[in-house]
Image (cartoon, coloured by chain):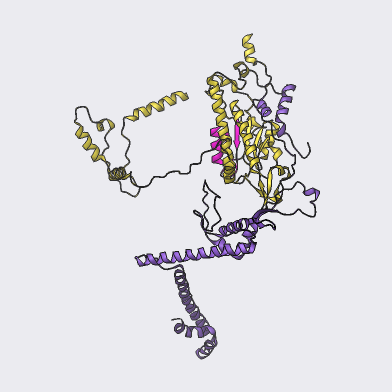
Chain colours: A purple, B yellow
Amino acid sequence: MGKINLTALRVRETALKQFASGKIKRLPQWVDVVGDVPPPEALIRKPPIQHQLVRQRMKTIPGSSQPQTVFEVQEKRRKPKKASRMFQPVELRYEEDELRQEFFRDHPWELARPRVLVEPTKNRFQHDWSRMKQPGKRLDGESVVQRQLWLLNNVPDMTKSAAYDIARREFYRLRLQEDIERRIAAEEAEATGAQFGPSMLEVGMELENKQYELWKDWAKNEAQILNQKFASLSGAPELANENDEKEPVKSFESVEPEELN
Amino acid sequence: MIVRQFGVRQSRQLLALSRRAPVSARFLSTETAVETPVTSSPESSVPSINSPLESGSTQSKQSLTESEQRWRKWEASKNAFHKLGSTTKDSYEPVPLSASEITLEHLLAAGTHMGHSTSRWNPQNSRYIFGIREGVHIISLDVTAAYLRRAAKVVEEVAARGGIILFAGTRKGQKRSVVGAAHLAKGYHIFERWIPGSLTNGEQILGHCETKVVNAFDEELPEFKNDLQDRPVVKPDLVVVLNPLENVVLLHECGLNNVPTIGIIDTDADPTRVTYPIPANDDSLRSTDLIAGVLGRAGQAGQNRRLQDAKDGKFSYQPVSADWLRLDPFTGMPLEAEQQKKK
């Protein structure tokens, strides 16, 4: 049948023909089902959905006192598409994408913060971005993006950079407030008798010190072995001592205990 | 033969009912063996009619081992405190949804819209694709919902006509949803490999498998057992494949045997391989579970309808008569033995 195999789509016709020609004695039970609910049309291309980047802005139009909402649609391509690309799907683009990219390029460590992956069933995306802080949502980079978008959509004659500055300033203030709250909570807890134990830095320093001690033991041992090797090679103890004085290992061994202890 | 064994087993259990359950000498392998207090025969442990009740109760108290006493104590404390603490409410219990309950939100949450990388697409799927996002094709959710409802309708109607439905999902982790869907739809399932030739060479591969004749209420009719010998193997009336890419052989055999198929078609699969494609993500277990659940529920609705119709004495299908069952499977004529009997 060539490249395209339509056997699966023509099961009913085949069954009817087989019955008519006497190949099968009974029609299968599903014949009328497939007749009532026919298989969908296949291999027929549709023109793909054209997605356009739409920007919503509030603008003061000369001649009218009130600012008006304006939708700016991205202008069409000057060069038309190739005929072979006519039926290819189109990229989905939203205004937030640019804002998100800009924010996370400037604040890459915002991506390292823990995120909540629990899926709520209701009110999933119902936030009012006229303010930065949202009930039930942790403050993160997405808050800045959404707040910036709200400012761009709703404040008259707002520019992208001005909206970014406003959203960022609010974000930094809230982050600072969170830090202060956290510090005060820890201080209060310590004042009422809580003990937090060694901090992560202290733990890390402890581990590092332990490794240094291990290395010291190992180095002492190595130096001793090297000394003995040289002594046995030279044969003359005076010469061996001379060699040892030139050796950096020897000098290290002689200096080390005072310096490191 | 089997029936007699069944009876014996049951009656043995009945005999054992009055007997005291055996208490092992040691509850833990680390414990040392302690002599069990009661080793007498069951007759002696049962208090006689003449003896007063107290004697029986004291004996039972003595017979408790240390660990049993600890268990009793723990149970008593549990009963005393079981009203304390918190109760869980609104916990998440995944239940397969029916096709009428499916919304685009469900499909989105299950991730059915995620296709493959744009470079891996099959252009035959262009009509199901909504757009490109981050280099990945996004399947249109409304198309998925429409095709899913269509497939569910087919499953329901085939189940209502008593058709044999086979659910196949051979990817890792699909076992549970495949078995669940087959259980709901009273169908059959494959969660391991499809053995090539199970349809085209069924006598060799499935010849030893048991078949049965059932009546309209799904009760077995054992008197037709002998008539089922030398019959061609049973073929499914509908095959649902959750991963058509790995089951090309199954779909090819379905084509050769003229069996309608339903399959989850991702953006890299060939939609003409199946009769009823469901454009959706076949790589996410959550997505395939959702779709298998919907089809299983549809099958359940169809089976319920068929049994209800059978109670009312109606048939939505053409019932098989006893005479037809006794025809020769190859010639379609009465069997030779019967012809000789008639003579």
Q: How many marks?
A: 0
* Residue A13 point in image, percent of width and height: 73, 28
The quarter of the image holding the N terminus of chain A is top right
| Residue B205: quarter of image | top right
Q: Nearer the viewer, residue A153 or A229?
A: A153
Q: Residue at 59% x, 65% y: name it.
A: A165
Q: Is residue B40 above or below residue A224?
A: above
As drawn, is A161 to the left or to the right of A224?
right
Q: Looking at the picture, tell me which residue is in the foreground, A237 or B49.
A: B49
Q: Is residue B22 left or right of residue A255?
A: left
Q: Residues in magenta?
A: B164-192
**What percent of the width, then of the height, locates residue A184?**
42, 66
x then y, percent, for residue B299: 57, 31
Residue B133 image position (x, y, % from top left):
66, 52
Nearest the eye: B197 or A115: A115
User: Based on the displayed image, in which of its 4 quarters is residue B313 positioned?
Assistant: top right
Q: Does residue B194 appear in this view? A: no
> Magenta stretch: residue B76 in it?
no
Q: Residue at x 54, y 27 (%)?
A: B304
Which quarter of the image is occupied by the C terminus of chain A? bottom left
Q: Nearer the viewer, residue A140 or A4?
A: A140
